[in-house]
Amino acid sequence: MSRTCSVDGCQRAHHARGVCRTHYQRLLKTGTLDKSEAIRRRTEASARRREEVARQRIEDLTWLADNGVGLTEAAHRIGMKRNSLETWLSRRGEKDLMHRLIARDWLPVGERGVNQWGDWRSAS
Ligand SMILES: [Zn+2]
């Protein structure tokens, strides 16, 4: 009789490390044979990757805002639609950054860092 997988209830043929091909793949990818622990580890790993992507995006947007780039142009540069970026920033609680970017949308090129309403306000 040929060797089978050592995982309880699994009848598949042995592949490596005492387990079948399916369970061996799970072990390789997650470091565990326990199904719920494997799912938990995968979920955690993808959440970490998403958070790292988000952190880099915030860093890039902060740089763009610091360099006078508005929300429309910033969205274009990071490959998002303006509305999606606005929603994303809002959901993450990055309202300061969002408002800084929006304010720059209204600045004419060449007046970056200058409040265009300054003169208008002082004239009234
Ligand atoms: Zn198995």
Image (cartoon, rainbow, N blue to C red):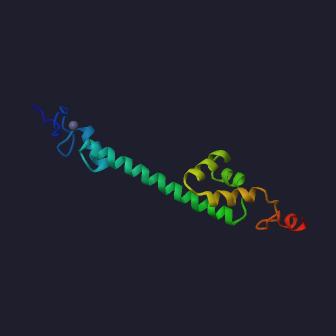
Residue 24 percent coordinates (x, y): 25, 43
Lateral position of residue 19 relative to residue 123, left or right: left
Residue 42 percent coordinates (x, y): 36, 47
Count how many numbered circles sit on residues in the image: 0
Residue 91 percent coordinates (x, y): 56, 50
| Above or below, 63 relative to 74 | below
Q: Is residue 52 visible?
A: yes
| The one of 52 and 100 positioned closer to us in this rendering | 100
Q: Is residue 110 visible?
A: no
Lateral position of residue 12 relative to residue 47, left or right: left
Identity of the residue furthest to the right in this view: 123
Residue at 83% x, 63% y is 117
The quadrant where ligand 1 appears is: top left
Lateral position of residue 16 relative to residue 43, left or right: left
| The one of 68 and 26 positioned closer to us in this rendering | 68
Identity of the residue furthest to the left in this view: 1
Q: Considering the image in quadrants, where does the C terminus appear?
A: bottom right
Residue at 69% x, 58% y is 101
Dividing the picture into quadrants, the one containing residue 12 is: top left
| The one of 72 and 120 positioned closer to us in this rendering | 120
Q: Considering the image in quadrants, where does the N terminus appear?
A: top left
Dividing the picture into quadrants, the one containing residue 22 is: top left
Residue at 59% x, 57% y is 94
